[in-house]
Amino acid sequence: MGIGDFLSSGNVRLDQQLRFTAEIDKMTGILRRTMLIDKSRRENDAEHSWHIAAMAMLFEEYASEPVNVPRAVEMCVVHDLIEIYAGDTFAYDVAANVGKADREKAAADELFKLLPEEQGAMIRSLWEEFDAMETPDSKYAACMDRLQPFLHNTLTDGFTWVESGTNRAVVEKRMAVIKEFMPEVYKWIEENMNRAIARGWLKESRRILLFDLDGTLLRSDKTISEKTLKAVLKAKEKGYLIGVSTSRSENNSLSFIDSISPDIIISSGGAMVNAYGSKIVLEGFSGDETADIIAKAREVIGDLNITVDTAEEDAEFYRNFTPPQDELEKSWGISIETDFKDFHKPSLKICFEIDSEEKAERLHKELGECDFIHFTDGDWYKVTKAGITKETAIEKLAAHLGVGLEMISAFGDDLADIGSLKMCGTGVAMGNALPEVKEAADITIGSNDEDGIAEYLEKLYQ
């Protein structure tokens, strides 16, 4: 049986209402791109409309203006009826959205004429008000329409975002009405976008400013000037992502940059990358390998100063010596003193202070495939897994976030920064940088002690 088997009631008006009721059953066959939370199948238009109508009964308290909830519920119920004829148009499909308004107007003309004239006009008026999003009721209903599939994405591993390769800018545009009309809810939206990007479900679209710490973002006294801090925070307000790329451990770095709350931290010379609070790169030595490297260093060198960045959850920074108190407070940040006896913690980076190049070379040979790099500002040598550099970390970061390297500006002053400055869209050398770093950069700015970064950023976002 079907609509052709409809038995007339003998009442023209009642027949129109019954036929319309039967016709809108077709909503159950209009599949959307959104996946059900149990991931068993895609939802249909009828399920979506019911879901957001129920939601409209719940979230009134977060609206920035008074809302007539029953009226908003009615809009939620009717907002997708025209898709019976026009079909569902995926919000993030640019090509499919071309001509959408004309298709939906034609569908409305066809569908609503099935009803008695005044009822067809009433439902069409609700649909048109929803579509215009100009009244508080329609904005509230639109918020529900956007919040529901967003919630589904957060609980289905970003299913439709991954499937369509969607980026942050597209989602932000779609969520703009929530940002305007339900700002408290939008905070949750933003946190979930960050999480989705960190997990690789959603692509990033913001430009990234990536700062080395010592000799770059930090002044010689290991502090960030007030002027530079304000400039970096303003860049963040303007929509730039703020990151640091340093040889320091993550936990140690945070003691210097807590005021910035960076979105991205590349630490331990590239062995660990943290984006939006999630570790997306972790490449280091096992606990046994760490103990073996320390034992070989003591065998070749004898007693020596050692530091270790661990790869555990808190990414601690360990040392076996006590620097002078003023140096400890100024330069070493958060660190833990230990004698490294029976030390078997997984590590990202191990450093040794060696005052003999000959002994350093002997140790290098003993360590085989490990990278062994001499810092330019003293007798310290860095040991990491082979091939771990700031630039390899940046490549992995960019691939994970879905951004091109041209979207990243890297700032630095030392030899370890050269690769980053060359590979990123804009390489910025500090005025105090080594000549080789300046040569590799696209631009040289003022020194770290002269607010070079602040002056550059102020021009950048003018």
Image (tube, rainbow, N blue to C red):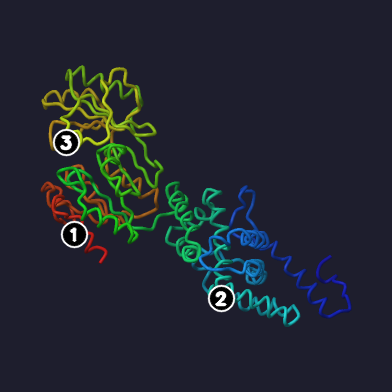
Image coordinates for residue 279, horizontal then vertical, percent: 39, 41
Question: In the rendered structure, are the residues bearing label 2 and label 3 in contact, judged by CB atoms less than 8 Å apart?
Answer: no
Mark 3 surroundings: few (<14), some (14-19) or many (≥20) residues within 10 A: some
Foreground residue among 52 and 185: 185
Foreground residue among 94 and 378: 378
Residue 388 appears left or right of 28: left
Above/below status of 299 relative to 447: above
Foreground residue among 179 and 416: 179
Q: Which residue is mark 1?
A: 455
Looking at the image, is mark 3 or mark 1 nearer the viewer? 1
Quote the CA–CA distance across marks 2 and 3.
62 Å
Note whether residue 439 is visible.
Answer: no
Image coordinates for residue 149, horizontal then vertical, percent: 56, 57
Residue 403 appears left or right of 52: left
Q: Which residue is mark 2?
A: 101
Quadrant for the N terminus, please: bottom right
- Nearer-N-terminus badge (2/3): 2
Q: Which residue is mark 3?
A: 375
- Looking at the rendered structure, the kind of residue marked 1 is Glu
Mark 3 lies on a secondary structure that is: loop
Image coordinates for residue 161, horizontal then vertical, percent: 50, 55
Residue 12 appears left or right of 158: right
* Residue plotted at (53% across, 75% down): 134
Looking at the image, is mark 2 or mark 1 nearer the viewer? 1
Note whether residue 260 is visible.
Answer: yes
- Looking at the rendered structure, the kind of residue marked 3 is Phe
Mark 1 lies on a secondary structure that is: helix
Question: In the rendered structure, are the residues bearing label 3 and label 1 in contact, judged by CB atoms less than 8 Å apart?
Answer: no
